[in-house]
Image (tube, grey):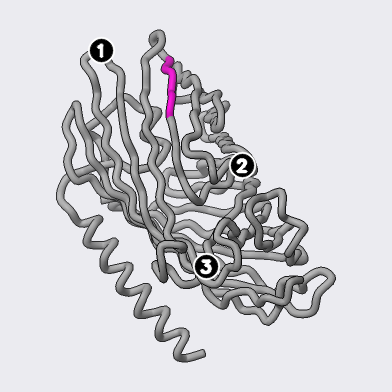
Amino acid sequence: MPRRVGRFLVRLLAGGMCLLLLAAVPALASPADGSAWLTSELGLLQPRLSYQAEHQFDQRVDNHSGEVGFNQHDLRAITPLWQNSSNELSLAGRARYLDLDTTAVLPSGKGLPSELWDLNLAAQFRHRLDGGSVLGLSVRGGSASDKPFHSDGENQYGATAFARLPSGRDGAWIILANYDNNRELFPGMPLIPGAGYWYAPSKRFQVLAGVPFSSLHLRPLADLDLNLSYAMVRTLRARATYHLVKPLSVYTGFEMFHQGYLLADRAHSENRLFLYQKRALAGTAYELGHGLVLDVSGGWAFDRFFFEGENYGDRWQDRLSLEDGAFFAGQIGYRF
């Protein structure tokens, strides 16, 4: 155990130093993520850095002997490389480490890995045309595995080309084409198209209706924010946030999501190890000042299971189902 802890701390420190260096690049850019598809403003992006630690308590495995519990560490950094009113180039890095404490095995007799990694680097470029349309391209590469970068079989990579086309005073059409070898929806398909309509008449009401993604932001009261986002097929996040006083807010929500890993010793190259879960949560966020935010949350995780297969349709063939249980998490973020 001390060797494992020492090895993890060395890797985390090395990854953290790399991401801190990325975040310290002078300038001011934006995330290489989907939120940048919605805005037509360029040149206003700021570097950000965040770290989250989460603990899920040991729980028994249904119909099998053993227990499963884990700690998860998630470090993210986003920085601009170059930007002005017409162009922006940004870089985003992520290092997620899942430390599994278990002796449980899958029905096939294969044991769960003691550690899982998801290491990724993404770059995004956007360009604003004279008519107000915005074109962009996002590319990413990395490895999600028990042995990251062990071979090409553990590597993940993807690219998304997208466009924002103004429509009326408060709306815009969003269109895209995506390739990713580790996505939930049609991982073997070369390209998946997407389209949606973004309507934002005010900061109190903003909606994106589309496929394979949708989102809603609603502020029915001056101090209450309601947010909902959905991505096909089984990713959903809903949250209600109440701002008590200027630096302090509380929230409650529901989310369902999954993680997918390309194990180094898998018998079939198309298989992945999946972790699916749903959870209800509540928490509080406090703005410490100077761009620093502290967030503490906890809740109840349920409908959790691991399985190894090609996609969600294989979820019953080599599955470990965990009993419901509590979790807690803490996060600290900094906006430069």
Q: Main secondary structure of the magenta part?
A: strand
Q: Residues within 10 Å of mark 1 (few under 14, many from 20)?
A: few
Work out which residue is located at the far top of the displayed protein and give it. 168
| Helix, strand or loop status at disc 2 | strand
Left or right: residue 280 versus residue 143 is right
Question: How many angstroms separate mark 2 from mark 3 (CA)?
Answer: 20 Å
Residue 85 seen in render: yes
Disc 2 + disc 3, Cβ < 8 Å: no
| Helix, strand or loop status at disc 3 | strand
- Residue 113 % position (x, y): 58, 75
Picture quarter containing residue 334?
bottom left
- Residue 214 % position (x, y): 55, 30
Residue 74 seen in render: no
| Helix, strand or loop status at disc 1 | loop
Does the segment drawn in magenta span residue 288? no
Give the residue at mark 1: 131
- Residue 299 % position (x, y): 66, 58
Question: How many angstroms separate mark 3 from mark 1 (CA)?
Answer: 45 Å
Give the residue at mark 2: 236
Left or right: residue 14 versus residue 53 is left
Q: Residues within 10 Å of mark 3 (few under 14, many from 20)?
A: some
Q: What segment carries the magenta color?
A: 171-176
**Residue shown at the point (40%, 28%) measured from the top left:** 38
Nearest the camera: 306 or 26? 306
Give the residue at mark 3: 72
Disc 3 + disc 1, Cβ < 8 Å: no
The disc, 3 or 1, on the residue closer to the chain's N-terminal end is 3
The disc, 2 or 3, on the residue closer to the chain's N-terminal end is 3
**Residue shown at the point (71%, 61%) measured from the top left:** 305
**Residue shown at the point (28%, 27%) measured from the top left:** 41
Nearest the camera: 119 or 53? 119
